[in-house]
């Protein structure tokens, strides 16, 4: 399960980097959602976007990132921080 999550995270992070030059021209300051290597939604409000994504993509990994000119680093939470 963790391997699948890491693979999905890496796929969406790579897709975001590939889309970034175009997004910097069209979506600066907005939040974008990527699933299966595709841009699937966007919004200026991160919470509204997250709620839509939760409804449409239950049980699937979707990366939500804000488009900004500064380089930000994604991090996948460590399993040590999870409680079960």
Image (cartoon, rainbow, N blue to C red):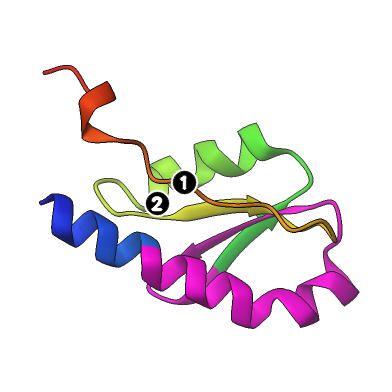
Q: Nearer the viewer, residue 14 or 50?
A: 14
**Numbered mark located on residue 30 in the image:** none
- Which label is found at residue 56? 2
Counting residues from the N terminus, which is met first, the one under dot 1 or under dot 2? 2
Left or right of residue 41: residue 78: left
| Image coordinates for residue 23, horizontal then vertical, percent | 77, 73
Q: CA distance from mark 1 to mark 2?
A: 23 Å
Question: Where on the picture, by quarter, is residue 4?
Answer: bottom left
The magenta segment is 10-39
**Seen in the image, is 67 located left or right of residue 57?**
right
> Which residue: 22% across, 26% down?
80
Q: x, y (%) of residue 69?
A: 85, 61
Tell me: residue 50, above or below residue 70.
Answer: above
* Mark 2 burial class by Cα count in 10 Å: few <14, some 14-19, many 20+: few
Say left or right for 69 vs 5: right
Neighbour tally class for label 1: few under 14, some 14-19, many 20 plus, Cα within 10 Å: few
Magenta stretch encompasses residue 13: yes
State the residue position of label 1.
Answer: 75
Q: Quadrant of the C terminus?
A: top left
Task: Tell me where residue 25 sits by quadrant.
Answer: bottom right
Q: In this rendering, would 68 be left or right of 54?
A: right
Classify 83 as above or below 78: above
Query: Which residue sits at x=78%, y=80%?
Result: 21
Helix, strand or loop at mark 1: loop
In the image, residue 83 lies in the stretch drawn in magenta = no
Q: Secondary structure at mark 2?
A: helix
Picture coordinates of residue 32, whole percent (x, y): 65, 58
- In the image, which is nearer the foreground, mark 1 or mark 2? 1
């Amino acid at each position: 399960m963790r391997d699948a999550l890491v693979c999905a995270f890496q796929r969406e992070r790579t897709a975001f980097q590939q889309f970034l030059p175009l997004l910097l021209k069209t979506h600066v300051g907005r939040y974008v959602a990527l699933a299966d290597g595709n841009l699937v939604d966007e919004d200026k409000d991160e919470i509204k976007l997250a709620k839509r994504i939760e409804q449409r993509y239950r049980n699937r990994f979707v990366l939500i990132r804000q488009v900004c000119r500064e380089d930000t680093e994604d991090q996948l939470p460590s399993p040590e921080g999870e409680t079960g």
